[in-house]
Image: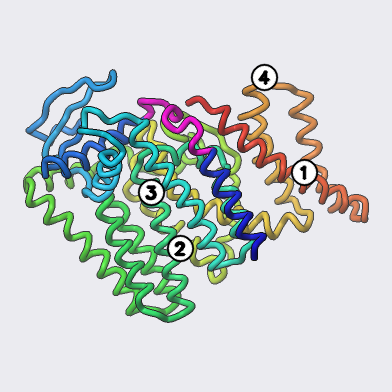
Amino acid sequence: MKYYFFALVFIILVGFWLRFANLSTIPRHGATFDEFAWTWQGINLIQKSIPISWSPHPQYMQKQHLIYQGAAFWIVKPYLEHPPLFGLVSGAFALLNGVSDMYHVTLEKIRPLSLILGTFSIFMIFVLCKEFYDKKTALIASLLYATIPTIVIGSRLVQNENFMIPFWLLSLYLVSIYLKTGKKIWVILAGVIAGLLSLAKVPWLIVGLSLSMVLINKRKWKDAFLVGGLTVLIFSFFIFYGIYYDKELFFSLWRLQLSRYDISFSGIFSIFTNPLLVDWGYLDGWILFGWFSMFLALKNLKKNVLIIIPFIAYFILFAFAIPNEPGHGWYRYPFYPFLIISTALFIKEEFVKPSLSLVLFFLVVGLSLMANTWEQAFGFSYPIYRASIIVWSLPILSLLLPSKKTIFLTKTVVILSAICFIILNIFAVFSYHG
């Protein structure tokens, strides 16, 4: 028990350190100005009782032009594109952290919130996996989530997705407890969390839907309707909120959101062809292999229901409502917890035996890490590249020529590669400058 506790503390500290380093500088200033939009919305709601932020949309009639920190904005009011909850959280945090008003917001003052949320996500990955699987899977998943470059760097943003992820995991955890204990309080709390998340961003209605789908899968029909009802009831506050401030503007913005451009198969395909971290592409083998491991997990819905159903729910949402806009990598972040958990399941099951899937894992993850570390520091090297492929293909020997020596060789490659990959993850985080 103590071993797992200290291991978890160590993982959380490593994850905190990686996120804290270069927190206010990477991703760079201007990678997205959504960080300012959310914070301005909340600050003005708190200070002026009216949502004011920036928006490019022509539906707004009350607007003024502003140059702030070298960027041009249209400041609009009332800002009704999104519900107020995350804006209130980020705005309140900024004010508590010493920001006096919207014209004194800096990344240094607001990004510590994302540090808290990112660290909380690592903890929730562990808690959910421990509850639904076992401690070993939980440690592997939390270690990966703490160190994978795409996740570490992306989690530094003050973005709604980074707020939604840990609380989605928390709601799934509460549902898992309910399914084990039958105590209604846990499913009610899960429904309340789902409803509150819908007040952070409209697409987060998917959280309540995913919880209801899990409960339906378990034949808990009444509880599924309870969660769905709580979600819709709490979300209805946003409708009244929009009507209160400006009914015509509110519904014109809804019409705009429902007809967003470039929602097509290209949006789904771009996940693989244009792997964005924020606004720049970043080829991370962990994320690519996560999709492969998820496809393996899909074969056993009963065993993996708490990661498969939320994953599918968000995948449908992504295809249905999320446009293929350039430079919006954060739309993909809600996939990552489930991709990483499925990868942890793969590692736990496949690292103890030789397989072709294990070789694929080494090549996809290992070669991408080499590209993001060794090549960044020293340039591309054919000898290093080809030697890496040979080493990571060695497990094939224990399949073709099974013996004590080849099995020992495979285990050695597996252990050393696992250690190497975590070290390279850390190296890749500090090598990123986008």
Mark 2, secondary structure of its residue: helix
**Residue 218 location, x and y as percent?**
45, 76
Residue 308 badge: none
- In the picture, measured across the screen, residue 73 lies left or right of residue 397, that is left
Task: Look at the numbered discs 1 and 3 and tell me whether their residues touch, using CB distance below 8 Å.
Answer: no
Residue 379 badge: 4
Mark 4, secondary structure of its residue: loop
The relative height of residue 29 versus residue 208 in the rendered view (above or below) is: above
Q: CA distance from mark 3 to mark 2?
A: 14 Å
Nearest to the eye among marks 2 and 1: give it. Answer: 1
- In the picture, measured across the screen, residue 339 lies left or right of residue 411, that is left
The residue under the point 36% across, 67% down is 190
Name the residue beneath numbered marker 1: 416
> Which kind of residue does numbered mark 2 sit on?
Ile
Name the residue beneath numbered marker 2: 309
Q: CA distance from mark 4 to mark 1?
A: 23 Å
Name the residue beneath numbered marker 3: 318
First in sequence, mark 3 or 4: give its number. 3
The relative height of residue 141 versus residue 70 in the rendered view (above or below) is: below
Q: Is residue 316 magenta?
A: no
Mark 1, secondary structure of its residue: helix
